[in-house]
Amino acid sequence: MNDHDPREFALGDDERRELGRWAAEGAARALALFESRAPDEARPRKAFEELRAYNAGGPRTARLRSAIWAALSCAKESEDPVAEAAARSIGVAAGTPFVHALATPHQSKHLLAPTAYRIRARSLLATGETDAVADEEIHWATAHASPTVREVLRRFPARAEGRGWMSALMYRLDVELRRAP
């Protein structure tokens, strides 16, 4: 730990793997959606598989980091907004093992953004039902969050409401995850 930055906190490998397992469960939902839209594109699946390898006890590797960047590049290159949001959800989820143990809103975003992007992908398909999609995904994410996931999230500062769809979704998810299970 760095004595010069009071925002740092302890975050062990077991906790990172628990965060990774939660992220992978959500990423599996996004992956199914992505592959239904872009069945010939393998980069998000590779990131998902590398995350699962880490969760199973593997190290944080350059291969995982490369797979993350590839999934995010896939999102950027996509002309399908649903596939783009789903690929982003997967890429950001795969980055969970690299979250810094630094109590900043930016770092908490790494835990919350995969769900927000998954909501975005599903909402683009749901004509007029975007609130119901958001409610369903936030409920799913909170129901699947272990006590460890919730406790680690509480080490980060609470999200502010902010502006825009992404900030609004991350704020709602953050509030729900901080509630006692």
Image (cartoon, rainbow, N blue to C red):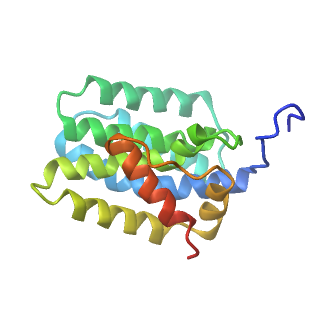
Say which of 158 and 147 sits in front.
Answer: 158
Which image quarter is the N terminus in? top right
Residue appearing at x 46%, y 39% in the figure: 92
In-image side of 25 versus 29 (left or right): right
Quarter of the image where one finds residue 83: top left
Question: In the rendering, at what x and y percent does residue 60 appear?
Answer: 65, 38
Q: Is residue 75 visible?
A: yes
Residue appearing at x 43%, y 63% in the figure: 141
Say which of 120 and 4 sits in front.
Answer: 4
In-image side of 22 versus 9 (left or right): left
Which residue in the rendered view is the most extreme toward the bottom? 181
Question: In the rendering, at what x and y percent does residue 145 appear?
Answer: 52, 66
Q: Is residue 39 visible?
A: no
Residue appearing at x 55%, y 30% in the figure: 65
Which image quarter is the C terminus in? bottom right
In-image side of 61 versus 26 (left or right): right
Which residue in the rendered view is the most extreme toward the right? 3
Question: In the rendering, at what x and y percent does residue 169 appear?
Answer: 38, 51
Question: In the rendering, at what x and y percent does residue 137 appear?
Answer: 34, 62
In-image side of 157 versus 165 (left or right): right
Q: Is residue 27 above or below residue 68?
A: below
Total numbered badges shown on the rendered structure: 0
Say which of 104 and 73 sits in front.
Answer: 104
Residue appearing at x 48%, y 49% in the figure: 112
